Amino acid sequence: MISLTDIATQAPVASWWLDSPVSSDWPCHNFWAHWAVFSAGIIIGVLLVVMAFIWFERRFIAPMQLRIGPNRCGPFGLLQPVADAIKVLMKEDIVPAVADKTVHFLAPILIFVPVLLMFAVIPFQNGVGLIPDLNVGLLFIVAVGSIETVAVFMAGYGSNNKYALVGAMRSVAMMVSYEMPMALAAIAVIIVSGTLSMQGIVMEQSVPFALLLPMSFIFYFTCALAELQRTPFDLLEAESEIIAGYHIEYSGMKFAMFYLGEYAGAIIQSAIIVTLFLSGWKGPILPPFVWFLIKLFAVFGMIVWFRATWPRVRIDQLMEFAWKYMLPLSLINLLIVAIETILWDPVQWWLVPVNIVITAVLLTGWAGMFKLRGGSEVGA
Amino acid sequence: MALKLAGYGLMQGLFVVLKSMTRKRITEQYPEERLTVSRRTRAQELVWDPDRCTGCATCVKACPQGNIKIKTSIGPDNKYVVEKFENDEGRCIFCGLCVESCPYEALFFGRSYERSQYQRNQLVADIDEMTSPEKEKSAYYRPELYDSLPEQTLLIYRKHKRIL
Amino acid sequence: MVMKTELVTLNMGPHHPSTHGVFRMRVTLDGEVVVEMEPMFGYLHRGLEKLAEGRTYTQIIPFTDRLDYVSSMAGNLAYCVAVEKLAQVEVPERAEYIRVIICELQRMVNHLIAVGFFINDLGALQTPLQYMWREREKVVDLFEMQSGQRFLYNYMRIGGVSHDLAPEFIPALKKFLDDFIGYYEEFEDLLKGNEIIQSRTIGTGVISAEQAIDYAMSGPCLRATGVNWDLRRDDSYSIYDRFDFDVIVGENGDNWDRYRVRMGEIMQSHRIIRQALEQLEELSPGSVNAELPQLLRPPVGEAYAAIEAPKGEMGFYLVSDGSIAPYRWHCRAPDFVNLCALRDMVVGGKIADLIVTFGSIDICLASVDR
């Protein structure tokens, strides 16, 4: 039987890129020079890609709504995010008088910085990244990603506004309850690939794990949508019913940090999905970094597509969905993957259609037992 | 619903949205492209023909708002001479009742809709503006002008080019 | 152990991104559940009923446009039907057919917009709304061809319509009707099977049939509760008895049924327009306006006439004292009456469903406040 680890070393990458020109000591064989270059590169890269994502989202939603997006600022509207940034920077920074000043000041910083931290362990190419082969890479990501929950609560609490606090509490409840299926889906990937290091996970995939573990992919994607607070889970963001969200008391540069943090979160979740499930930077002919960007934009395109199409769910339906539907199914998924990995140790190719069929059956069957209830049956 | 895959309706919706991405965009890039208004348009100006008007003030009585103001005096051979014919286009609702009621067909609608001014008192159209030769007449309630006007652009027929 | 919670009073003020106009609601909440709701409207009151007492019957027609500005042809038609009943005016055949075609087109378009904004309130980022707006733009172009303006048409006159059909109207209308079926199937694909819409609208905003009749509701809101009443069939005006159409009736009176009734009525209007076009072709050309003096003086008396406007039963009550202006002019606005039932629909439900229920009644604040 052909095992996937055999194929992994002959992955379809143009071989002249496979030997990394960049070792983990580049440049100058000094770790601090390496750290300085990559930190600067990641920060600049994230800012540029955030602007590209903002532009891409607006130009990509527009044809779905039969219109043309921004096309007046610069050719094809490419300078539109720059115009937005300048506008937001010129606004006055208002802090409520009764707000808790320290907490109010720290919250935007605390939303943006963990996202930047998570970029440290993503491999952009074979071995290229800040520390992509950290042997606890995925654990680092899950841990650092939980800081955002605290930051959201700080934003709501520090505003000293009843509605911001209620919005922040709802948001925290949502983020906490969606982290569990997310972590369980990621654990399934760890079981199959045998390593926590992000570089190792990419090297193990010659069949992308999205095909081998379809339920993990679907659940991770849905939980990423919930963590990013994007439709269909965006009850606290755009024009929500009454409560305008945890960032209503912010203006000026701090609001820009929230906005940046949201899009940077979109980038990092897309990057994690690409690395874990879509085999990272691997691909024929083109240089791997270009493949990474293409897959990143493809995942973000799907996120934008879902935003354009679906309405939002209600808060109690959201919690029911997470706890009664996704959590049991992700545990069952973990059980199945563990059994398969033990019985057929070098993972076989025919497990792909078997897993897809099992996923379809489980998702449909469980949904038959559980229906999102509407109406005024409170607590029924 | 139990027999269909869970989420089948959601997937169907996604593909409808994807299909409409391939259709033509319906935005028009104003002011570079302007669509032709209807031949019977009730645009934001009135055109007055001083030769046909006799100063009977039927239009003044027909207006629901009382915008039109006429001042006449008795001229030679006992006919009215219209000295002032004014329409306050800031208050006018462009309903067209004045155009319909004129018994001598001396009042027409114009065809221009880009008539904003900076101050409200500049919106009052006095006699020079009403008789200005650059104004085109629309065929509202004047069917003899219908064939000489260009056709209206309809969205039903519009072939719009795709811009990215 | 029962948790003691406080009741919170929330004011959803006149300026709000989700209400359809200037509308204020004072809502008392117990956690997430609505305990009491008090609507306050009147922010758009312009005194139309008083203004109408000083104007002649023809001069009031532009005012009826401004009642329900989303479907202003229906407002025009209701008023003209009332005056024709008061003054006993005969409307020529050709004008009746044109009125039916225009009114049914207006109904199609109004229901599309109502459903579009309803889905918008659910949170779908205006994508379905844009698709439905495209269809409305096509119809508004046709109305512009007929009446001259895209918005407040002022098209119907007492005793007929103001202009005959333009020569390009019927071919364009036929092309629109043919293309529309494909787009309607797309709307159904996009929205009907969507599990999120189903789970958020089935069972929310429920009103029973007895309550609906007590509140004197009408239109799609009443038919969604199961009451089979449609003025076009039951209290027929104009020439609706020559057409063959079904009346769509719902079951439970929740948001989902109101949505389904509206979508069904769109296709029934499509059917009526096709039949009207066929019957119109066999008609010989004639005048589209009855012979009336310029200043109409109806005989002394009073009349009430109502039509099935897209939002419900729109009626006008006129009292004439023999002069050129009415002595009393009153408009029975359908959404004002339907809005009064909002409290019963919402109490006991959640705050998130309040906005959705409010959007599903399909009101236009200018008609509520007059």
Image (spheres, coloured by chain):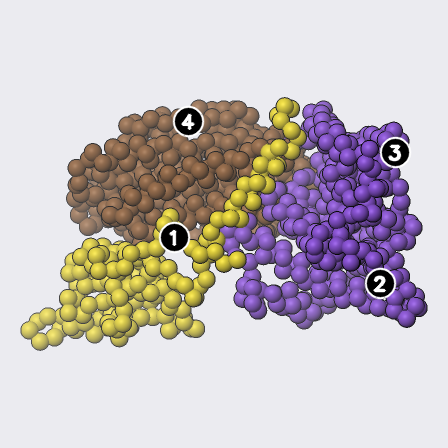
Could you tell me the amino acid type at mark 3? Asp
Snapshot quadrant of residue B80: bottom left
Real-space CA distance between mark 1 and mark 2, rounded to the nearest whole angstrom:
56 Å
- Tell which tag, 3 or 1, sits nearer the viewer: 3
Q: In the rendered image of this protein, which colour is used for chain B?
A: yellow
Residue at screen point 55% across, 38% down: C190
Q: Position of residue C116 (x, y in %)?
A: 51, 43
Q: Which mark is residue C247?
A: 4
- For mark 1, give the secondary structure: loop
Q: Position of residue B18 (x, y in %)?
A: 56, 45
Q: Nearer the viewer, residue C351 or A114?
A: A114
Image: A116 above or below C286: below
Q: Residues within 10 Å of mark 4 (few under 14, many from 20)?
A: some
- Tell which tag, 1 or 2, sits nearer the viewer: 2
Q: Nearer the viewer, residue C338 or A367?
A: A367
Please name the residue that numbered disc 2 is placed on.
A22
Chain coloured brown in this rendering:
C
Task: Determine the chain carrying the residue at label 3.
Answer: A
Q: Which mark is residue A345?
A: 3
Left/right placement of residue B93 relative to residue A219 reads left
| Badge 3 vs badge 4, beta-carbon distance below 8 Å | no
